[in-house]
Amino acid sequence: MSEVAISQDRSLHELDRLAELAEDVIRRARAAGASQAEVAASIDTGLSVNVRLGEVETVEHTRDRGFGLTVYFGQRKGSASTADLHPDSIQATLEQACAIARYTEADPAAGLADAARMATAFPDLDLWHPWAIDTAQAIALGVAIEDAGRAHAGISNSDGASMQAGEGLSVYANSHGFVGRERGTRHALSLALIAGEGDGMQRDYWYDSVRAAGDFISAQALGDKAAERTLARMGARALSTRQCPVLFAPELARGLVGHLLGAVSGGALYRQASFLLDHAGKRIMPAWLNIDERPHLPRGQGSGNFDAEGVATVDGALVEGGVLARYVLGSYSARKLGLPSTGNAGGVHNLIVEPGSVDGERSDFDGMLQRLGNGLLVTEVMGQGVSTVTGDYSRGAAGFWVENGAIAYPVEGITIAANLREMFAGIVAVGADVDPRSHILTGSILLERMTVAGE
């Protein structure tokens, strides 16, 4: 066995141990007077290596444990956690959670998710792929990635290559009698490079993130991609202020979907801090556009059989025919809003933005550039200028000016601005160039118009 990989049998044994501990603590919490209780326990292990200019910068082995307990005395809630699974630490955590609950105010929305919503089916989602790589092999892989990138003429320096192999085991259990076990692996490779000197210096990067190491692109391909992206930024210039079509590259397009999620999530809604308040059942995007949640995709970055409260995950539309089909709710926010949970405590599980366009055609990236015609391709955004309350969007950006469907020159030092309400309504096309490295699966997104502020 490698230094990092947990064997199949050992992972199952560890899950059984966590489940037994969770069930025991729940029994003890009930004996202490709690009307309801829930436990989340985890063990995460990993190897992380960073190399720069062919030399090792850091090597880190991790083995982290977590144990969190929430108890309810009626509708008074107390939570406590520990990173130590020693019996004395667990007992202290239990006592602290109970003490907190006895002194908190009752909250009518507090409590476990409904017992009838607990998951009962646990199909294998193909998420467990330990990577049998030792430290020496990890270093060699990082060096190979960096060498591939630095071999390109014009690359003047490196910010380093990194490799991470990670495995996670987790158990969620509650006093409904639910016990859910999950195990998953996440591995990543990345490289950041520098081209040019002085004021003309440019930096860019590329990365890959997978469940199974066999799904990585090659070290050569990753190095080449990082170098090509970095060199393409050379000679970047500013633009004059204008309004124009804007194409978000796939890795940035998912950020737009993330802003949608923020606005339709329960916390923002019951606090009345969303520009999409009371928009369920209303059109917010073009009629051809659909966004679906698919929690059970094999090897999916966000796949899971149950949410953070044990509620069964199910396929369902978030946006259907441009209409907001539902909100994104856990049980607490659902009760605050007088609605049922959508099985999204802890977030969404694999959102798929279907490729399409106003004319019904699906386009690859080159096709999306043709659709853009004359406009801005955005490949980087900076700053936090997005308001979920008002929908106002204003961020620093860099990318490329496109003329007649072809990249003309790189641009930087600009700001792109609009309102998310108009941005969502003004989507012209979603590309088929889907970026698989996230739980939000979307291609590039073309917007009809934004304000580009420059010189």
Image (cartoon, rainbow, N blue to C red):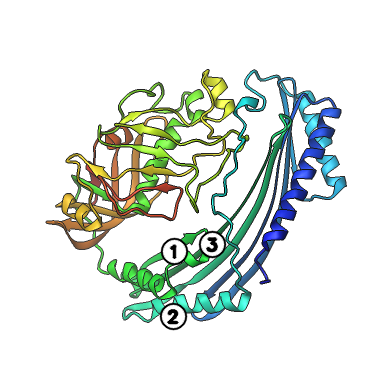
Residue at the spot of label 3: 187
Left or right position of 14 against 376? right
Q: Which amino acid is tagged 1?
A: Tyr
Residue 84: x %, y % from top left: 79, 51
Q: Residue at x 27, y 49 (%)?
A: 431
In this orientation, which residue lies closer to the viewer: 267 or 319? Answer: 319
Left or right position of 29 against 139? right
Residue 202: x %, y % from top left: 34, 68
Q: Is residue 343 above or below residue 416?
A: above
Residue at the spot of label 2: 147
Residue at the spot of label 1: 207
> Local crowd at mark 1 within 10 Å, few (<14), some, or many (≥20)?
some
Q: Which amino acid is tagged 3?
A: His
Which picture quadrant has residue 101?
top right
Residue 402: x %, y % from top left: 18, 57
Q: Tag on residue 79?
A: none
Q: Which quadrant does the N terminus fall into?
A: bottom right
Q: Secondary structure at mark 2?
A: helix
- Mark 3 → mark 1, Cα distance in angstroms: 11 Å
Whether label 2 touches label 1, CB < 8 Å:
no
